[in-house]
Amino acid sequence: MDKLTALNRANPNIPVYSIHDEAFRTYGRVIAADTAALCKTAEAAVEFPTEGSKYLASISELEALPEMAALQEEYCGQLDEQWGLCLGHSNQLNALEWHTCNEFNVAVRELVLLIAKRSDMDENHRLDANKIKAFYLAPGEMVEIFADTLHFCPCEVTKDGFSCIVGLQRGTNHPLENRKQGLLWAKNKWLLAHEDNTSLVQRGGYPGIYGENWVIHPVDSQKG
């Protein structure tokens, strides 16, 4: 049984699509690139969390790679990009965010992205969780997520956890110089919390997502 089939059997309430499915083209595009050096460097650069997840906006070892420079030249329009890593253990929606720039993701370890469109929000920045779709990335696969696509921390496919290289315009996700205003959570980062995510709401997250707080149930790491 392949991993995508196993994921769908374990998660009958939310279909999990491949990024190669036609449905993904609304949210981003697949980049056919040799990411082996990027993934090897990412695995060695950061100690993997035993629980929870963490995000590092910029990792010098990644940014120094000639392969990264070539990708940036081809896909980033000569803008200054930061290349970091989001990794660990997570399997629930909890929130969504967006930026004014596209985001590049490379699956160092396989993962699922839960995503929607900004146009799916109503005039009060409220989003029905039924608008959200789930997409699977195999290890080494790379995508460009469009700026009008809502996304957040990836979900793990197995209990080995997820690991994702994240490329963004430099400064994105850095702390604000002034206090948070409205949905603006960090520099170039607007955030919707799921209304059931009381911890994030209590810290000032706007409770804009309602309905199912989707959970991606991991599968046996030996399957697929």
Image (cartoon, rainbow, N blue to C red):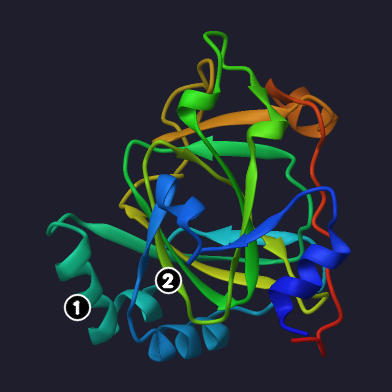
Judge left or right: residue 121 versus residue 221: left
| Residue 120 image position (x, y, % from top left) | 54, 25
Q: Please, what secondary structure does the residue beneath circle 2 have? A: strand
Say how many tags the image has: 2
Inter-mark Cα distance, 2 to 1: 14 Å
The picture quadrant where one finds residue 29 is: bottom left
| Residue 158 image position (x, y, % from top left) | 79, 75
Residue drawn 78% across and 49% down? 92
Q: Which amino acid does label 1 sit on?
A: Ala
| Residue 105 image position (x, y, % from top left) | 45, 64
Residue corresponding to mark 1: 70
Relative to 216, does residue 46 appear above or below in the rendering?
below
| Residue 1 image position (x, y, % from top left) | 78, 85
The picture quadrant where one finds residue 77 is: bottom left
Q: Which amino acid does label 2 sit on?
A: Met
**Taking the image as drawn, is residue 49 in sight?**
no
Q: How crowded is mark 1: few (under 14 residues within 10 Å), some or many (20 or more)?
A: few
Residue drawn 47% across and 29% down? 118
